[in-house]
Amino acid sequence: MNGRNCCIRSKSPIIAVILNLLIAGLGHVYLGYTKRGIVLFFLSGFIAIISSGLGWIVGVLLCSYDAWQLANNRPAPFDFLEKYIEEQQTRLRV
């Protein structure tokens, strides 16, 4: 089940995507993945700097897709970050 708890109160995938479209990583913070959101924010910013801003669009879209997958308890593109940032999900239990 990808390390996600099935008994956790679900949050809206649409809100997570909208927040990520506003600021990369913000949707992850909304979902309870604070460290992951912060890492993705800075990673998207770094990619934007080295790509003259065009990478920001790709970064934001990837972050949005990642948040959508997390909100739906599916495998997400940035799941590999879990072993590096040692984040446990901080969502509330029902």
Image: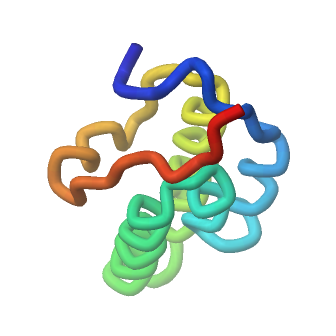
Q: Is residue 55 visible?
A: no
Q: Quadrant of the C terminus?
A: top right
When the figure is inspected, residue 44 is found, relative to residue 58, above or below; the finding is below
Left or right: residue 80 versus residue 56 is: left
Picture coordinates of residue 36, whole percent (x, y): 41, 59
The residue at the point 36 percent across, 26 percent down is 3
As displayed, is residue 13 above or below residue 54? above
- Can you tell which quarter of the image residue 24 is in? bottom right
Q: Residue at x 36, y 48 (%)?
A: 88
Q: Closest to the observer: 38 or 56? A: 38
- Quick one: which residue is furthest to the left in this view? 84
Determine if residue 35 is in view: yes
Q: Nearer the viewer, residue 44 or 39?
A: 39
Kindly indicate the quadrant of the structure image that contains residue 27.
bottom right
Residue farthest to the front, as pictured: 94
Relative side of 46 to 60, left or right:
left
Q: Eyeballing the image, is 88 above or below 69?
A: below
Q: Position of residue 73 (x, y in %)?
A: 57, 23
Figure quadrant of residue 57: bottom right
**Which residue corresponds to the image point at 51% horizontal and 80% vertical from the top-left?**
53
Q: Residue at x 65, y 25 (%)?
A: 72
Residues 50 and 39: in front is: 39
